[in-house]
Image (cartoon, grey):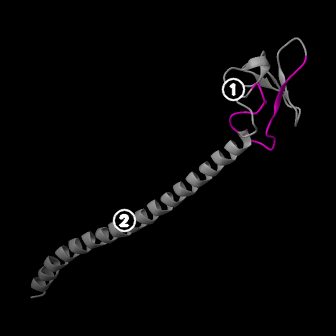
Amino acid sequence: MIREYFFIAMLTMIPAGIILYFLIHLGKGLIGMVSDRSLHRELDELAAHGETRRQAREESNQKRLDNGCEHEFDGALGGFPPEVCHKCGLASQKPNGPCDHVWRAGEGGAPHSACEKCGRQYNPSKERGAYA
């Protein structure tokens, strides 16, 4: 009689354990889906914030370039760094750092240029156009 109860208990415990196992994995999957959804929402918010910052940076760059000059960014004429207008000395994109360089051609035999605000120099005759 005890053996019968033991076997009946085992026959009911095994299917109950299997069902419980699948319910636990189903619950973990649902929790994962909820966290994935919130993660995607946060990523979308970050992407939107990055896009607004990029648009603001582009607008400020356009305002910066509106100085009445018909910019010519092609070619590094007279020792100017690449992507710098040889007429007004502004770069097509604002450089990183505190100084918005305004490049002017330097004097001397070798072509070079210097920023009139901070004094930084650019020498295209050195390796890959070195800054000093």
From the top left corner, tell me how far across and down residue 37 is, in percent.
41, 64
From the top left corner, tell me how far across and down residue 46 is, in percent.
54, 57
> Residue, x 80% and y 44% (percent of image)?
98
Viewer-nearest of labels 1 and 2? Answer: 1
Question: Residue under circle 1?
Answer: 72
Q: Where's the N terminus, which quadrant? A: bottom left
Q: Count numbered badges in the picture.
A: 2
Question: Residue under circle 2?
Answer: 33
Part of the protein shown in magenta: 86-107
**Residue at the top extreme?**
109
59 over 39 or under it: above or below: above
Give whichever of discs 1 and 2 has the lower sequence position. Answer: 2
Q: On the rendered structure, is 132 left or right of 11? A: right
From the top left corner, tell me how far across and down residue 23 is, in percent.
27, 73
Identify the secondary structure beneath mark 1: loop
111 over 29 or under it: above or below: above
**Residue at the bottom extreme?**
1
Residue 24 placement: quadrant: bottom left
For marks 1 and 2, give the CA distance.
Answer: 53 Å
> Residue, x 67% and y 43% (percent of image)?
62
Which of these two is toward me, 119 or 12? 119
